[in-house]
Image (cartoon, grey):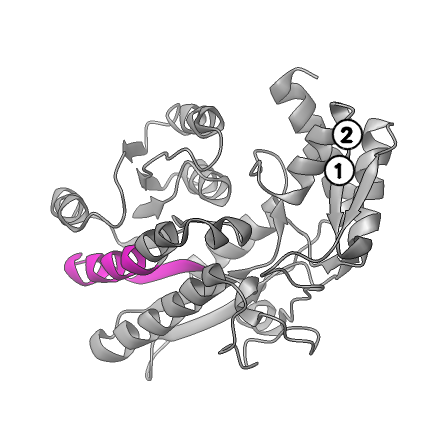
Amino acid sequence: MTVLVTGCAGFIGFHTALALLQRDEAVIGVDVVNDYYDPALKEARLAILGQHPGFALHRLDIADRAAMTGLAAAHPEIDRIVHLAAQAGVRYSLTNPYAYTRSNVEGQLVILELARQLPRCEHLVYASSSSVYGANTKLPFAVEDRVDQPISLYAATKKSCELMAHCYSHLFAIPTTGLRFFTVYGPWGRPDMSAFLFLKAILAGEPIHVFNGGDMRRDFTYIDDIVQGVLAVLDRPPPGPGLPYRLYNIGNHRSEPLMRFIGLIEQAVGIKAEIVFEPMQPGDVKETFADIEAISRDVGFAPATTIDQGIPRFVEWYRQYYGQ
């Protein structure tokens, strides 16, 4: 069994690829290793994956049609795809929009075409985002909610991914499942995410910037729970007959106050943060909260890690990795 994992040098991609390798799957990893954040962190993740004989890395841009077609020709044994490569970040989409249309829209189309080319492809699982819910005030967010009023380009590109997947499932009977991730954190996390930014600043004795005066809530989801859900979904393609298309929220089903999240970081490091309160940022939302009834019912997804457990684990990894 061989799984193509795009974005394998990224946070969720690395953990997903590692979990697949640990259960003796062969993994074909694809990542362009760009400099959106520290490439050294990505290379460190790849070094761990490279210790496994079942891992093969291809440094490719997923939006490069010729390169990805060549990959499909070289690896006809690929039977499943976990497509996690994307240009992430709401705020960065305000200043570099073309990176999002290339990676998230063109890249998704290339991967869908790749799934058509691969003779043994049984299932394509791809990353969407809770950002598609925009300024929705109905809580918790459910996959049945309308999501046609995005408030960031990032969210618009992720909704486009869902629409394209639906089209390919309808036209070509390609089994696809989209996962709307909710604020993932944990060891090997992304430096542009809140947990990483807050911890780095606190340890450096620098102020942290907290938006909307701190009146924010997030469905923080620990990486191990996310990976358990991704693999459970991957192992269960949409059943027939009918349209082989599914869409799930994947979150912790807990909406936590941001200030409590910060307090747990302070507690874990034993340092009080200096906080600078800022107004709400364009494209940001006040609260997220995932309705996970569907994914729990269909694949048994059961997140088990609270932020009280997950934050100390993240802090421990950070201090070990950076020698602090």
Q: On the picture, is 69 further left or further right than 36?
A: left
The first of marks 2 and 1 along the sequence is: 2
Q: Is any atom of residue 34 visible in this view?
A: yes
Image coords of residue 211 (percent x, y): 73, 52
Check if mark 2's residue and mark 1's residue have beta carbons within 8 Å.
yes
Q: Is residue 65 magenta?
A: no
Residue visible at 39% across and 38% down in the picture: 24
Residue visible at 44% across and 67% down in the picture: 156
Residue 300 drawn above or below residue 31: below
Q: Is residue 119 magenta?
A: yes
> CA separation, marks 2 and 1?
7 Å
Q: Secondary structure at mark 2?
A: helix
Q: Nearer the viewer, residue 200 or 256?
A: 200
Residue visible at 37% across and 25% down in the picture: 50
Image coords of residue 20 (percent x, y): 42, 42
Image coords of residue 247 (percent x, y): 47, 71
Give the residue type that dot 2 points to: Ile
Q: Nearer the viewer, residue 85 or 285?
A: 285
Image coords of residue 87 (percent x, y): 42, 49
In the rendered structure, find residue 208 and report the number of the disc placed on it. Answer: 1
In the rendered structure, find residue 202 and report the number of the disc placed on it. Answer: 2
Mark 1 neighbour density, 10 Å: few (under 14) some (14–19) many (20 or more): some
> Residue 294 appears in which quarter of the rendering?
bottom right
Q: Nearer the viewer, residue 182 or 285?
A: 285
Q: Is any atom of residue 237 visible in this view?
A: no
- In the image, which residues are magenta? 105-128
- Quarter of the image with the C terminus is top right
Residue visible at 81% across and 28% down in the picture: 269
Residue 167 drawn above or below residue 259: below
Give the residue type that dot 1 points to: Ile
Q: Secondary structure at mark 1?
A: strand
